[in-house]
Amino acid sequence: MLHDTITPYIKKLSYPLKEEEELKIALKRLLTKKEFKIIEYNDAHLSIDEKLLKLRVDAKRLDEMQQNLIKKLNYEKNKHQLMQI
């Protein structure tokens, strides 16, 4: 479930997250394709090697993308788009 995957990345959540389908649509709008795939691969519990192979990036770039993903999820404007208000 996307809820379980992204909740640890968000530092302070004021309201509950949207339903699964709505959340998926909101995430696709906010993130790049590869950042969204990282969330999907984390949800599928893929290993780091499998993520690197599927995304066709090196370990350093994967780490950078994950850090950017976390930053984007924690912007207040973006959090409001992910929550049920």
Image (cartoon, rainbow, N blue to C red):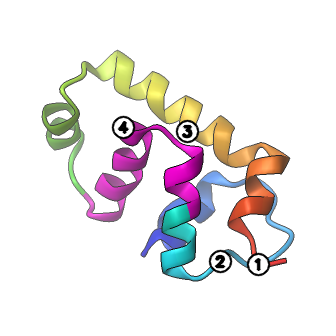
Q: Earlier in the sequence, mark 4 or mark 1?
A: 4
User: How many numbered discs?
Assistant: 4
Is the C-beta separation of discs 4 and 1 under 8 Å? no
In the rendered image, residue 5, in percent from the top left (x then y), is placed at 48, 64
Q: Earlier in the sequence, mark 3 or mark 2?
A: 2
Helix, strand or loop at label 4? It is helix
In the rendered structure, which amino acid carries the disc numbered 1?
Gln
Q: Earlier in the sequence, mark 1 or mark 3?
A: 3
Task: Identify the residue under disc 1.
Answer: 84
Q: Does the magenta stretch include residue 11?
A: no
State which region is magenta.
26-45
In the rendered structure, which amino acid carries the disc numbered 2?
Lys
What is the crowding at mark 4: few (fewer than 14 residues within 10 Å), some, or many (at least 20)?
some
Task: Identify the residue under disc 3.
Answer: 69
Is the C-beta separation of discs 2 and 1 under 8 Å? yes
Q: Is residue 35 magenta?
A: yes
Task: Identify the residue under disc 4.
Answer: 34
In the image, is 23 to the left or to the right of 58?
A: right
